[in-house]
Image (tube, rainbow, N blue to C red):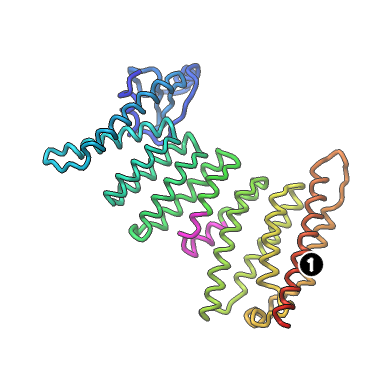
């Protein structure tokens, strides 16, 4: 096993994977052309690299030993400032081996931390962007790697305020998450990263993301993480709207009202179309709670009433009637052998019990404030 064979391929790839040796024959038959290597344990084509599982352990051990030796030398001589560039060479060597090691073992924390140390010391935007490329390469074979996602967040924090294209980076990050989520189902870490990105997005980006993620969510109604992302986007919209109201820069409630109304209508359509999906009912809880807090006008909050347009009917009685009608339509169990209808009835009943409790608490709280 020659570590240099692996090294010669790294600059050429944007995706890496590990396969059984028997699959190499199939890959070579399907490929019209592939890169030829002295070592038959690698296969590369169209910037994709496949590594035989037979050599993973020896390759990992070789990469680890090389990296540990390199950082040992760096710690010993890295602070030297010699004209020959010896310290710089040690640094480059350690960075090179850390990259190889992370492509074989994504959770090797020492390698991630060493790269943070070097990149933060140099404070060059291009080096930070290179870290995004490396972590994306790691995520291509380990999409749920917490350390890789954390590294991306660290990079974005470091370049925030220094990079003029931060909004573009945030947009590309969101696209990366969606691409990974398509391949790696129920990937909480990826969606958590996407939720975290919302604070770095502009208002236009947030609205665009809300519109764009709707189609994806409609096709993955069992993935609660996607609806949690929509929750985060809508909360950001609401926060900005409330700040504008406080500053007196806006008294328009129609737009925010329309966003919530469309989401409620869309959610109701999904609930009726996809029977027994808990994620849809949980998302409706968020929508209902936000509606009661921000759009009802009969709970004694006169300041909120003045902020609302006369065309907006925020009467809590009408809202509850609509929700009761929805719950009632979902409580029928036409076939006892079909568990989805039983689940639908249970979720609808639980939702109404929860909503009733919320309304009572809100009314009592408002009454106490006005007494």
When the figure is inspected, residue 168 is found, relative to residue 16, above or below; the finding is below
In percent of width and height, residue 3 lies at 33, 23
Q: Quadrant of residue 355?
A: bottom right
Q: Nearer the viewer, residue 235 or 43?
A: 235
278 drawn magenta: no
Q: Residues within 10 Å of mark 1 (few under 14, many from 20)?
A: some
Q: Quadrant of residue 261?
A: bottom right
Q: Which residue is mark 1?
A: 320
Q: Main secondary structure of the magenta part?
A: helix
Q: Residue at x 81, y 67 (%)?
A: 321
- Look at the numbered disc 1 and give the secondary structure of its residue: helix
Quadrant containing the N terminus is top left
In percent of width and height, residue 114 lies at 34, 41
Q: Is residue 125 left or right of residue 138?
A: left
203 drawn magenta: yes
Q: Is residue 237 left or right of residue 93?
A: right
Q: Residue at x 60, y 50 (%)?
A: 226
Quadrant containing the C terminus is bottom right
Single out the residue that lies furthest toward the left.
83
Instruction: Look at the image and give the residue range highlighted in magenta.
Output: 196-211
In percent of width and height, residue 22 lies at 50, 16
Q: Residue at x 45, y 59 (%)?
A: 200
Q: Nearer the viewer, residue 305 or 46?
A: 305
When the figure is inspected, residue 367 is found, relative to residue 184, above or below; the finding is below
Q: Residue at x 56, y 66 (%)?
A: 237
In percent of width and height, residue 203 lies at 49, 65
């Amino acid at each position: 096993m020659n570590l240099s064979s692996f090294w010669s391929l790294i600059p050429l790839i944007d995706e890496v994977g590990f396969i059984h040796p028997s699959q190499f024959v199939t890959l070579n038959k399907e490929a019209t052309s592939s890169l030829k290597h002295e070592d038959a344990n690698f296969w590369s084509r169209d910037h994709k690299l496949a590594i035989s599982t037979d050599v993973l352990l020896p390759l990992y051990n070789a990469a680890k030993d090389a990296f540990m030796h390199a950082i040992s030398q760096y710690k010993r001589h890295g602070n030297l400032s010699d004209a020959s560039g010896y310290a710089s060479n040690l640094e480059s060597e350690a960075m090179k081996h850390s990259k190889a090691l992370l492509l074989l073992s994504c959770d090797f924390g020492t390698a991630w931390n060493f790269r943070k140390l070097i990149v933060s010391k140099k404070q060059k935007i291009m080096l930070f962007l290179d870290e995004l490329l490396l972590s994306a390469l790691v995520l291509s074979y380990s999409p749920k790697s917490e350390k890789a996602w954390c590294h991306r967040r660290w990079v974005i924090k470091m370049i925030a305020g220094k990079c003029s294209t931060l909004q573009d980076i945030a947009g590309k990050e969101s696209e990366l998450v969606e691409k990974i989520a398509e391949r790696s189902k129920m990937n909480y870490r990826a969606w958590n990263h996407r939720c975290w990105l919302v604070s770095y997005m502009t208002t236009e980006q947030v609205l665009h993301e809300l519109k764009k993620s709707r189609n994806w969510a409609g096709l993955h109604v069992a993935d609660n993480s996607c609806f949690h992302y929509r929750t985060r986007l809508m909360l950001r919209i609401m926060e900005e709207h409330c700040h504008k109201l406080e500053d007196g820069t806006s008294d328009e409630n129609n737009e925010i009202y329309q966003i919530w109304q469309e989401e409620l209508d869309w959610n109701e359509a999904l609930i009726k179309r996809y029977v027994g999906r808990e994620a849809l009912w949980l998302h409706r809880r968020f929508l209902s709670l936000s509606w009661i807090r921000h759009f009802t006008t009969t709970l004694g909050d006169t300041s909120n009433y003045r902020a609302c347009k006369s065309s907006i009917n925020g009467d809590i009685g009408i809202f509850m009637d609509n929700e009761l009608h929805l719950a009632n339509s979902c409580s029928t169990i036409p076939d006892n052998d079909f568990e989805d209808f039983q689940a639908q009835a249970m979720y609808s009943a639980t939702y109404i019990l929860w909503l009733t409790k919320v309304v009572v608490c809100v009314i009592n709280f408002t009454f106490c404030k006005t007494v």
